[in-house]
Image (cartoon, rainbow, N blue to C red):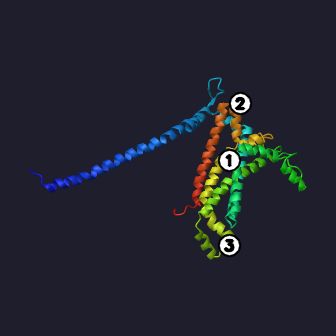
Amino acid sequence: MSVTYAEKSQGAVKQSPSKNTLSMSTQRRREAIAAYLFIAPAFILFLIFVAGPMLWSIGLSFFEWNIFTPPKFVALKNFTTLFNDARVLASFRNSTIFVIAVVALDVVVALGLAALLQRKMPAPLRYFFRTTFLLPVVTSMAAIAIVLSFMFDTQLGVINYYLGQLGIAPVRWLNSSQWALISLIIATIWKTFGFDLILFYAGMQNIPRHYYEAAAIDGANGWQQFRHVTLPQLSPTIFFVVVIGIISHLQMFDQANIMTKGGPGNASTTVVMVIWDSLASLKLGYGSSIATVFFIIILILTLIQFRISRRWVYYEGKED
């Protein structure tokens, strides 16, 4: 039976989509392979230097090991010990107080100063303040801690000198269980608030001006505009600052180790200091168990923050 020219043409038309689909799938496969090859080095380094040591530390928390003797499996002994260790519990309490105070004050100070920088002022003056606030951020925490140790000195510190000029008795900033943690909080805020300020200032610059114009037409004053326009529009930035701040400040070590050595007593001891001391004394299993509990706490706090953020973080263009 002969096949007409029209039938051949129809058959060719019917076969063409399958060839196009095949070529598109091949192209996508090649793009996927290329993408995996590009991310492979970073993923391998992550496995070697992050995920691997993390899993190793979790596994080691069930053992007693001091490097010189074979590891001894002790099940949950390390965990029961740390929950009855007064120094560990004090470090968790100190880290909690420290993080709450630093993150809250960081946000308030940075947000207030960013709002002030938004006001009309000469450009050189605005650039001066932005640079001044950012300088501590790019300075080493160790250098700042050393300088502030001299400033907080009870006898020779410049802070107590000016307090004395006001008729206030010298404060034992670093040698008092009442003031040691407060001193670390002040030092940390001075170091970190500039970074948050720059983020808030950049976020405020991106808020459309017609929002403020509409609010002003409705009779909103400066505070009402800040509350009902600036804060909702800036909520994603605030959320970012809070999440990053909690994670980073929970791992505080440098300033406490340099300025107070964790003292007096355990008044300024942090969780990372306890982990460091455990590892330095070759209690590797015990230190790993503290690190594991610490990791779980940070993970839970982060997940809770992301869950709660749905109620107060506003993303423009996103509908509930």
Q: How many residues crowd mark 1 within 10 Å: few (<14), some (14–19), many (20+)?
A: some
The vertical placement of 234 against 1, above or below, is below
Provide residue 75's location: percent of width, then percent of height.
Answer: 61, 31
Amino acid bearing label 1: His
Vertical side of 222 occupied by 245: above or below: above
The residue identified by callout 3 is: 221
| Among the 4 quarters of the image, the one containing residue 209 | bottom right
Give the farthest residue toward the top: 69
Kind of residue at disc 3: Asn
How far is mark 1 from mark 3, CA to CA? 36 Å
| Residue 215 percent across, percent down from the top left | 62, 73
Judged left or right of residue 298, residue 9 is left
> Which secondary structure lies at badge 3?
loop
Neighbours of disc 2 within 10 Å: few (<14), some (14-19), many (20+) = few
Query: Tag 2 or tag 1, which sits nearer the N-term?
Result: 1
Q: Nearer the viewer, mark 2 or mark 3?
A: 3
Residue 108: tell me if it is visible: no
Residue depicted at x 61% and y 32%: 60
Side of 64 relative to 263 (left or right): left
Instruction: Provide the residue designation for mark 2.
Output: 281
Instruction: Kindly identify which numbered label has been placed on residue 249.
Output: 1
Q: Residue at x 68, y 47 (%)?
A: 249
Q: Earlier in the sequence, mark 2 or mark 3?
A: 3
Give the number of callouts.
3
Residues 166 and 177: in front is: 166
**Residue at (64% x, 60% y) in the render:** 201
Tell me which numbered mark, 1 or 3, is placed earlier along the sequence: 3
Q: Quadrant of residue 263?
A: top right
Q: Between marks 1 and 2, how big is the CA–CA gap?
A: 25 Å
Residue drawn where x is 41% and y is 43% of the image: 33
